[in-house]
Amino acid sequence: MKRILLTQSKSPYSAINAQEGLDAILMGSAFAECAVLFQGDGIYQLLKHQNPATLGTKNFTATFGALADYGVEQIYCIDEELTERQLAPTELVIPVIPITRSGLCDFIREFDLVLDF
Amino acid sequence: MKIAIVVQGGPYSHEASLSALHFAKATLDAGHEIYRVFFYNDGVYNASDLIAPPQDETDIRGEWTRLSDLHDVELITCIASSLRRGLLNETESERYEKSAANLNPAFEISGLGQLIDAGLSADRTVTFAA
């Protein structure tokens, strides 16, 4: 089975990429084995206690909790990026597997298809 | 080689669509096949039939249509992205009871499955992000 990596690279409400990326993850899970990498400010999508109602934006991040139900269980982030943003894994809505920045290229090479959002 | 192209940027506001267009032409010139061009995110604006650029600027939508006419390239816009941004064909315009349709006929509205299928079927997938 082919393996897809979807990367979420933008903060949750700065652009619609985050929400439309999540849609692509859910669709991809119906076709192939999917993994997700939260990189750069994309990691902010996973912060707990988000309340974007005052922005007039839907809190789509609740859907991340359902990724496992779609068979998407490989969720990655870059270890150094958590440190740079002073984030602890306990502050995130789902468990993430940290990889090192130096290992990123080898990690990406393991996939047949990479889609960036 | 079969190439899939993903366009995420709107015409004139972001370089992504012009770069994708140049890449698509180069792909065909080099003898490769374009499996599909998938327009996602603001990329769906490339499909608007109502774009009327100044005469001394590239007619980006027109270039996509010509590419499709000359080389039978499949141009697909994501339905969720399109509806959100007001890019409707006749069918969707009637379904949502809107006053007009504006999707250029060279483009088709379809689902995200077409993006995943393109990525899995092509030898290479090249994304022009915004």
Image (cartoon, coloured by chain):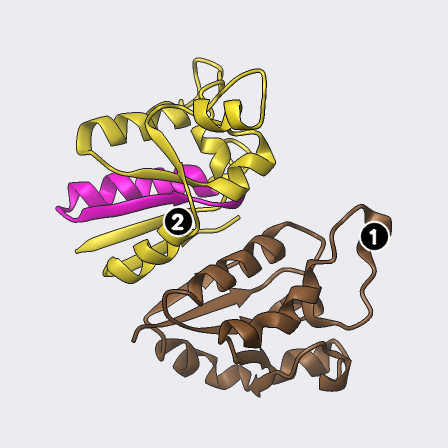
Chain colours: A brown, B yellow
Dot 1: element: helix
Any magenta on residue A13?
no
Residue drawn at x 48%, y 40% is B79
Quarter of the image with the N terminus of chain A is: bottom left
Residue drawn at x 31%, y 73% is A2
Mark 1 nearby-residue class (10 Å; few <14, some 14–19, many ≥20):
few
Does residue B126 sit above or below B68 in this rendering? Answer: below
- Mark 2 belongs to chain: B
Mark sitting on residue B41: none
Dot 2: element: strand
Q: Which residue lies under the disc numbered 1?
A: A53
Any magenta on residue B24?
yes
Q: Which residue lies under the disc numbered 2?
A: B6
Q: In which quarter of the image is residue B1?
A: bottom left
Could you tell whether B54 is left or right of A17 in the image? left
Q: Where is residue B76 in the image (x, y as percent from the top left)?
A: 37, 39
Mark 2 nearby-residue class (10 Å; few <14, some 14–19, many ≥20):
many
The three-letter code of the residue at mark 1 reads: Ala
Does residue B54 sit above or below B20 in this rendering? Answer: above
- Mark 1 belongs to chain: A
Residue that lies at the very extreme toward the top in this rendered image: B55
**Which stretch is magenta?**
B16-42
Q: Quadrant of residue B91?
A: top left
Q: Do discs 1 and 2 share a chain?
A: no
Q: Where is residue A71 in the image (x, y as percent from the top left)?
A: 49, 76
Residue situated in front as seen by the camera: B58 or B120 = B120
The three-letter code of the residue at mark 2 reads: Val
Residue situated in front as seen by the camera: A28 or A103 = A28
Q: Where is residue B57 in the image (x, y as percent from the top left)?
A: 44, 21
Residue drawn at x 56%, y 60% is A22
